[in-house]
Amino acid sequence: MLDGLALKNQTLGFVPTMGALHEGHLSLIDKGLQENAKMVVSIFVNPTQFDNASDLKKYPRTLESDIEMLKSLSEDILVYAPTVEDVYGDAIASETFDFDGLEHQMEGKFRKGHFDGVGTIVKRLFEIVKPDFAYFGEKDFQQLRIIQKLVEKHNLGVTVVGCDIFRAEDGLAMSSRNQRLTKEHREVAPFIFQTLTAAKAHFGTENAEEVTKWVEEQFKKHELLELEYFTIADEETLQPVETKEKSKSYRAFIAVFAGDIRLIDNIALN
Ligand code: PAF
Protein backbone atom coordinates (compact mmCIF):
# COMPACT_ATOMS: atom_id res chain seq x y z
CA MET A 1 0.00 0.00 0.00
CA LEU A 2 1.32 3.47 -0.86
CA ASP A 3 4.78 2.28 -1.89
CA GLY A 4 5.28 5.60 -3.72
CA LEU A 5 5.63 7.39 -0.41
CA ALA A 6 9.00 5.79 0.16
CA LEU A 7 10.25 7.38 -3.06
CA LYS A 8 9.42 10.80 -1.70
CA ASN A 9 11.17 9.97 1.55
CA GLN A 10 7.94 10.36 3.47
CA THR A 11 6.73 7.93 6.05
CA LEU A 12 3.51 5.98 6.37
CA GLY A 13 1.94 5.53 9.78
CA PHE A 14 -0.61 2.89 10.74
CA VAL A 15 -3.19 2.42 13.49
CA PRO A 16 -4.88 -0.98 13.39
CA THR A 17 -8.27 -0.98 15.13
CA MET A 18 -11.37 -3.08 15.55
CA GLY A 19 -13.53 0.01 15.06
CA ALA A 20 -16.03 1.56 17.48
CA LEU A 21 -13.51 4.38 17.53
CA HIS A 22 -13.07 6.47 20.67
CA GLU A 23 -10.74 9.17 21.95
CA GLY A 24 -8.07 6.57 22.73
CA HIS A 25 -7.88 5.63 19.05
CA LEU A 26 -8.00 9.28 18.05
CA SER A 27 -5.01 10.08 20.25
CA LEU A 28 -2.99 7.37 18.42
CA ILE A 29 -4.12 8.63 15.02
CA ASP A 30 -3.31 12.20 15.98
CA LYS A 31 0.21 11.26 17.03
CA GLY A 32 0.61 9.35 13.77
CA LEU A 33 -0.59 12.32 11.71
CA GLN A 34 2.00 14.54 13.36
CA GLU A 35 4.81 12.10 12.62
CA ASN A 36 3.96 10.79 9.12
CA ALA A 37 2.93 12.05 5.67
CA LYS A 38 -0.04 9.65 5.51
CA MET A 39 -1.87 7.43 7.95
CA VAL A 40 -3.70 4.18 7.34
CA VAL A 41 -6.37 3.21 9.88
CA SER A 42 -7.68 -0.32 9.56
CA ILE A 43 -11.07 -1.31 10.92
CA PHE A 44 -11.50 -5.04 11.27
CA VAL A 45 -13.12 -7.05 14.05
CA ASN A 46 -10.72 -9.98 14.00
CA PRO A 47 -12.58 -13.24 14.73
CA THR A 48 -9.49 -15.30 15.56
CA GLN A 49 -8.55 -13.25 18.63
CA PHE A 50 -11.87 -13.83 20.42
CA ASP A 51 -11.98 -16.82 22.74
CA ASN A 52 -15.68 -16.29 23.33
CA ALA A 53 -18.26 -16.40 20.52
CA SER A 54 -20.73 -14.18 22.34
CA ASP A 55 -18.06 -11.49 22.94
CA LEU A 56 -17.29 -11.52 19.19
CA LYS A 57 -20.98 -11.29 18.30
CA LYS A 58 -21.62 -8.43 20.71
CA TYR A 59 -18.46 -6.46 19.90
CA PRO A 60 -19.65 -2.95 18.90
CA ARG A 61 -19.63 -2.34 15.14
CA THR A 62 -20.06 1.25 13.98
CA LEU A 63 -18.29 1.20 10.60
CA GLU A 64 -20.20 4.04 8.94
CA SER A 65 -19.78 6.54 11.74
CA ASP A 66 -16.14 5.46 12.19
CA ILE A 67 -15.43 6.23 8.54
CA GLU A 68 -17.25 9.56 8.78
CA MET A 69 -15.20 10.50 11.81
CA LEU A 70 -11.90 9.60 10.15
CA LYS A 71 -12.83 11.48 6.96
CA SER A 72 -13.59 14.62 8.93
CA LEU A 73 -10.31 14.34 10.83
CA SER A 74 -7.83 14.63 7.96
CA GLU A 75 -7.41 14.08 4.25
CA ASP A 76 -4.19 12.25 5.01
CA ILE A 77 -6.04 9.28 6.49
CA LEU A 78 -6.79 6.21 4.41
CA VAL A 79 -9.26 3.72 5.82
CA TYR A 80 -8.78 0.01 5.22
CA ALA A 81 -11.86 -1.98 6.25
CA PRO A 82 -11.59 -5.49 4.80
CA THR A 83 -14.19 -8.24 5.20
CA VAL A 84 -13.42 -11.47 7.05
CA GLU A 85 -13.20 -13.18 3.67
CA ASP A 86 -10.72 -10.61 2.32
CA VAL A 87 -8.40 -11.38 5.20
CA TYR A 88 -8.94 -15.09 5.80
CA GLY A 89 -10.53 -16.50 2.65
CA ASP A 90 -12.60 -19.45 3.81
CA ALA A 91 -10.08 -20.63 6.42
CA ILE A 92 -10.65 -18.56 9.54
CA ALA A 93 -7.69 -19.79 11.56
CA SER A 94 -4.66 -18.45 13.42
CA GLU A 95 -1.02 -19.14 12.89
CA THR A 96 0.78 -20.40 15.98
CA PHE A 97 3.43 -18.10 17.42
CA ASP A 98 6.20 -18.32 19.96
CA PHE A 99 6.56 -14.96 21.67
CA ASP A 100 9.30 -16.14 24.06
CA GLY A 101 6.88 -16.56 26.96
CA LEU A 102 5.28 -13.10 26.76
CA GLU A 103 2.07 -14.81 25.70
CA HIS A 104 1.62 -17.17 28.65
CA GLN A 105 0.67 -14.70 31.38
CA MET A 106 -2.39 -12.59 32.08
CA GLU A 107 -4.46 -12.15 28.90
CA GLY A 108 -2.78 -15.20 27.37
CA LYS A 109 -3.68 -17.31 30.37
CA PHE A 110 -7.29 -16.20 30.57
CA ARG A 111 -8.06 -15.90 26.83
CA LYS A 112 -6.79 -19.05 25.14
CA GLY A 113 -5.48 -18.48 21.62
CA HIS A 114 -5.96 -14.71 21.90
CA PHE A 115 -2.39 -13.73 21.06
CA ASP A 116 -2.11 -16.20 18.17
CA GLY A 117 -5.14 -14.39 16.73
CA VAL A 118 -3.62 -10.96 17.37
CA GLY A 119 -0.26 -12.05 15.92
CA THR A 120 -1.94 -13.47 12.81
CA ILE A 121 -3.94 -10.36 12.01
CA VAL A 122 -1.25 -7.81 12.86
CA LYS A 123 1.34 -9.67 10.77
CA ARG A 124 -1.11 -9.85 7.86
CA LEU A 125 -2.02 -6.17 8.17
CA PHE A 126 1.64 -5.13 8.36
CA GLU A 127 2.33 -7.14 5.18
CA ILE A 128 -0.59 -5.49 3.37
CA VAL A 129 -0.17 -1.91 4.62
CA LYS A 130 3.66 -1.91 4.85
CA PRO A 131 3.81 0.98 7.31
CA ASP A 132 6.99 2.59 8.61
CA PHE A 133 5.46 3.24 12.03
CA ALA A 134 2.57 1.53 13.81
CA TYR A 135 0.90 2.95 16.92
CA PHE A 136 -0.51 0.89 19.79
CA GLY A 137 -2.01 1.99 23.10
CA GLU A 138 -0.51 0.88 26.39
CA LYS A 139 -3.94 -0.14 27.70
CA ASP A 140 -3.13 -3.42 25.96
CA PHE A 141 0.43 -3.39 27.26
CA GLN A 142 0.92 -7.14 26.86
CA GLN A 143 -0.31 -6.88 23.26
CA LEU A 144 2.16 -4.02 22.66
CA ARG A 145 5.09 -6.08 23.97
CA ILE A 146 3.95 -9.08 21.89
CA ILE A 147 3.74 -7.01 18.71
CA GLN A 148 7.24 -5.66 19.31
CA LYS A 149 8.37 -9.28 19.64
CA LEU A 150 6.45 -10.27 16.47
CA VAL A 151 8.21 -7.55 14.48
CA GLU A 152 11.61 -8.53 15.88
CA LYS A 153 11.20 -12.28 15.28
CA HIS A 154 9.67 -11.99 11.82
CA ASN A 155 11.77 -9.04 10.62
CA LEU A 156 8.68 -7.09 9.66
CA GLY A 157 10.55 -3.78 9.35
CA VAL A 158 7.96 -1.70 11.21
CA THR A 159 8.74 0.59 14.14
CA VAL A 160 6.18 -0.09 16.86
CA VAL A 161 5.31 2.98 18.90
CA GLY A 162 3.69 2.54 22.32
CA CYS A 163 1.36 5.36 23.41
CA ASP A 164 0.08 6.39 26.84
CA ILE A 165 -3.28 5.10 28.01
CA PHE A 166 -6.05 7.57 27.24
CA ARG A 167 -8.39 7.89 30.22
CA ALA A 168 -11.80 9.43 30.75
CA GLU A 169 -11.80 12.28 33.28
CA ASP A 170 -12.81 9.87 36.02
CA GLY A 171 -9.84 7.60 35.23
CA LEU A 172 -11.52 4.80 33.28
CA ALA A 173 -9.26 3.64 30.45
CA MET A 174 -10.89 4.22 27.06
CA SER A 175 -12.10 1.04 25.40
CA SER A 176 -14.64 0.19 22.74
CA ARG A 177 -16.19 -2.15 25.30
CA ASN A 178 -17.05 0.83 27.57
CA GLN A 179 -19.98 1.57 25.23
CA ARG A 180 -21.61 -1.65 26.34
CA LEU A 181 -21.48 -0.92 30.09
CA THR A 182 -24.77 -0.31 31.87
CA LYS A 183 -25.15 3.09 33.52
CA GLU A 184 -24.56 1.47 36.91
CA HIS A 185 -21.41 -0.32 35.79
CA ARG A 186 -20.06 2.76 34.02
CA GLU A 187 -20.46 4.70 37.26
CA VAL A 188 -18.41 2.25 39.31
CA ALA A 189 -15.83 1.35 36.64
CA PRO A 190 -13.33 4.09 37.70
CA PHE A 191 -12.81 1.94 40.82
CA ILE A 192 -10.46 -0.15 38.66
CA PHE A 193 -7.99 2.68 38.08
CA GLN A 194 -8.43 3.98 41.64
CA THR A 195 -7.43 0.55 42.92
CA LEU A 196 -4.45 0.37 40.55
CA THR A 197 -3.28 3.78 41.74
CA ALA A 198 -3.59 2.71 45.38
CA ALA A 199 -1.81 -0.58 44.59
CA LYS A 200 1.09 1.42 43.17
CA ALA A 201 1.39 3.32 46.46
CA HIS A 202 1.27 0.02 48.41
CA PHE A 203 4.02 -1.44 46.21
CA GLY A 204 6.35 1.25 47.56
CA THR A 205 6.48 -0.53 50.93
CA GLU A 206 4.89 -3.94 50.42
CA ASN A 207 5.80 -6.97 48.33
CA ALA A 208 3.83 -8.17 45.31
CA GLU A 209 2.02 -10.88 47.25
CA GLU A 210 0.81 -8.44 49.90
CA VAL A 211 -0.34 -5.93 47.30
CA THR A 212 -2.15 -8.66 45.33
CA LYS A 213 -3.95 -9.80 48.47
CA TRP A 214 -4.96 -6.24 49.25
CA VAL A 215 -6.37 -5.73 45.74
CA GLU A 216 -8.27 -9.03 45.90
CA GLU A 217 -9.85 -7.93 49.18
CA GLN A 218 -10.97 -4.61 47.69
CA PHE A 219 -12.79 -6.42 44.89
CA LYS A 220 -14.31 -9.01 47.21
CA LYS A 221 -16.01 -6.13 49.00
CA HIS A 222 -17.25 -4.60 45.74
CA GLU A 223 -20.82 -5.45 44.80
CA LEU A 224 -20.70 -4.76 41.07
CA LEU A 225 -17.17 -5.53 39.91
CA GLU A 226 -15.57 -8.95 39.83
CA LEU A 227 -11.79 -9.34 39.68
CA GLU A 228 -10.47 -11.88 37.18
CA TYR A 229 -6.78 -11.32 37.84
CA PHE A 230 -4.36 -8.83 39.32
CA THR A 231 -0.71 -9.48 38.51
CA ILE A 232 2.48 -7.53 39.15
CA ALA A 233 4.96 -8.40 36.44
CA ASP A 234 8.35 -7.44 35.09
CA GLU A 235 7.69 -4.86 32.39
CA GLU A 236 10.23 -6.42 30.04
CA THR A 237 9.55 -10.16 30.34
CA LEU A 238 5.97 -9.92 31.70
CA GLN A 239 6.83 -12.68 34.16
CA PRO A 240 5.11 -12.24 37.54
CA VAL A 241 7.51 -10.71 40.06
CA GLU A 242 8.79 -12.84 42.91
CA THR A 243 11.31 -10.59 44.58
CA LYS A 244 11.55 -6.91 43.80
CA GLU A 245 14.83 -5.79 42.26
CA LYS A 246 15.86 -2.16 42.13
CA SER A 247 17.20 -2.42 38.58
CA LYS A 248 13.91 -3.66 37.13
CA SER A 249 10.69 -1.94 36.10
CA TYR A 250 7.37 -3.41 37.14
CA ARG A 251 3.79 -2.96 36.04
CA ALA A 252 0.50 -4.05 37.59
CA PHE A 253 -2.08 -5.63 35.28
CA ILE A 254 -5.75 -6.14 35.98
CA ALA A 255 -8.83 -7.69 34.36
CA VAL A 256 -12.27 -7.10 35.82
CA PHE A 257 -15.79 -8.10 34.91
CA ALA A 258 -18.46 -5.40 35.08
CA GLY A 259 -21.48 -7.63 34.49
CA ASP A 260 -20.53 -9.53 31.35
CA ILE A 261 -18.20 -6.79 30.08
CA ARG A 262 -14.54 -7.54 30.61
CA LEU A 263 -12.30 -4.54 31.20
CA ILE A 264 -8.51 -4.46 31.40
CA ASP A 265 -6.09 -1.83 32.62
CA ASN A 266 -2.51 -1.51 33.89
CA ILE A 267 -0.17 0.91 35.61
CA ALA A 268 3.59 1.43 35.67
CA LEU A 269 4.88 0.93 39.21
CA ASN A 270 8.24 2.71 39.04
O1 PAF B 1 -6.09 -3.70 19.97
C1 PAF B 1 -6.90 -4.01 19.07
O2 PAF B 1 -7.87 -3.30 18.80
C2 PAF B 1 -6.69 -5.30 18.30
O3 PAF B 1 -6.17 -6.28 19.11
C3 PAF B 1 -5.85 -5.13 17.02
C4 PAF B 1 -4.43 -4.70 17.35
C5 PAF B 1 -6.51 -4.10 16.11
C6 PAF B 1 -5.77 -6.46 16.27
O4 PAF B 1 -7.02 -6.90 15.87
Image (cartoon, rainbow, N blue to C red):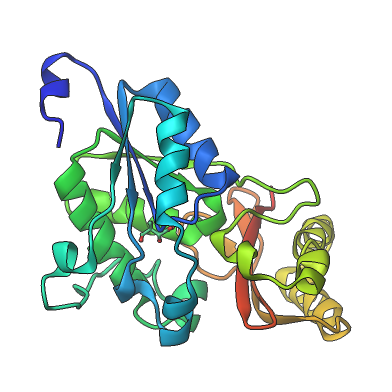
Q: Is residue 228 visible from the viewing direction of this image?
A: yes
Of 236 and 115, nearer the camera is: 115
Please indicate whether residue 252 sits to the left or right of residue 134 in the image.
Answer: right
| Rendered position, 194 above or below 96 | above
In depth, the one of 13 and 78 nearer the eye is: 78
Left/right placement of residue 137 relative to residue 216 reads left
- Left or right: 9, with 176 as reference point: left
Ligand 1 occupies quarter: bottom left
- x then y, percent, for residue 193: 76, 59
- Residue 242 in view here: no
Displayed quadrant of residue 208: bottom right
Residue at the (43%, 53%) spot, across then down: 144
Q: Which of 44 and 136 is in front in this view?
A: 44
Residue visible at 83% across and 55% down?
Answer: 201
Where 28 falls versus 185 (above or below)? above
Residue sticking out furthest to the top:
8
Which of the image's four quarters has the N terminus? top left
Residue at the right extreme of this rendering: 221
* Residue in the image at 50% along x and 48% along y: 137
Quadrant hosting residue 240: bottom right
Q: Where is residue 218 in the image (x, y as percent from the top left)?
A: 85, 77
Rendered view: 196 above or below 89:
above
Count of picture labels: 0
Task: Give the x, y percent position of residue 221.
Answer: 89, 84
Place of residue 50 in the rendered image (x, y in percent of width and height, measured from the top left): 39, 77
Residue visible at 72% across and 48% down in the picture: 168
